[in-house]
Amino acid sequence: MTGLTRSALTGFAADLGGTKTAVARLDKGEVVDRLVAPTDGAADPAAQVAVIRDLLGQLGHVAGAPLGVAVAGRVDAQGRWHAVNHGTLSAIRDFALNEALVRALGAATCLNDAAAAALAEGLFGAGAKSDSFAFVTVSTGVGGGLVLHDRLLSSANGLAGHVGFVTSRFASGPCGSGRFATVESIAGGRGIAAAGAASGRQGVDARAVFEAAGEGQDWAEQIVATSAQAIAALIGDLTAILGLDTVALGGSIGLAPGYIDRVSEALAGEPALFRPAVVHASLGHDAPLIGALASHLEREST
């Protein structure tokens, strides 16, 4: 995508996540108007598209206006939408998302939300000066995207960039992906909550575990440290495969106070060759919106 500048990003974008759906109007790369609504995780895909359409209409979108749509889950090369964790979006199963968006809204491009964020960060944010960049989001789950020489790494099945499904030596339990012992199962919010329950603290969520760790409680400190160690090991593995020079952490956990320091401390145990620069993602909740529109404009230009 060499040559696409942020100032060229004028149009609309949507970001459908497990808890909220955001839509935005962008002008010259900046979000100038935004609406947010709760996501109904049990709604069927047609209803999810209808919510996006109605919200965009409130921002002045007209059929055919440039539009990029980022969604939680896997989006394959045919624009079909598949949930990778049915506990988040329970009704999403092999839905022709791109076709539905075109029928409802005119021209549109869809992709995974973490991939969209990775593209934005890689081109215009924390990875703008990187040749081999990874974005890793650590929140309820663990996701990401890979931007190599200014191009988002993609695959026909839409799985490329789902880095949380890599196995981890720190994990042993099941993952929502159907795999076992993955990074997501130990490092993400669901995994942290499960570790808290396994320690005898029933009903705690990731936020409560982090608060307890901040108070110096050993059980919580160990859980948070293990999460950071799993992410550090993932960074080392990705660097061995892709020769990364920069990794940006995002997500509610990835951006939590002190978390990046824990990851960097754990990564210090790796040989220097496997230690890329680890930085905070810089575009915040705008990243999936910016990346989705950038993906659409790049597709339209080819």
Image (cartoon, helix red, strand yellow):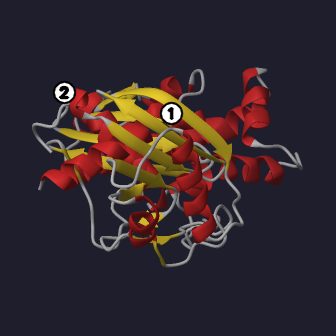
Label placed on residue 215: none
Q: Which residue is at a point 61% across and 55% down the rendered structure image? A: 51
Q: Which residue is at a point 19% across and 54% down the rendered structure image? A: 300
Q: Secondary structure at mark 2?
A: loop
The residue that disc 1 covers is: 285
Q: Are marks 2 and 1 in contact (CB under 8 Å)?
A: no
193 horizontally vs 272: left or right: right
The residue that disc 2 covers is: 129
| Cα distance between the residues tagged 2 and 1 | 21 Å
Where is residue 74 drawn, in percent x and y?
45, 65
Q: Which residue is at a point 58% across and 46% down the rendered structure image? A: 55
Number of marks present in the image shown: 2
Location of residue 176 by image quarter: bottom right
Q: Secondary structure at mark 1?
A: helix
Q: Can residue 30 be seen? A: yes
Amino acid type, label 2:
Lys
Amino acid type, label 1:
His
Toward the bottom, the furthest residue is: 94
Location of residue 286 by image quarter: top left
Where is residue 89 drawn, in percent x and y?
64, 64
Q: Nearer the viewer, mark 2 or mark 1?
A: 1
Where is residue 261 drawn, in percent x and y?
50, 23
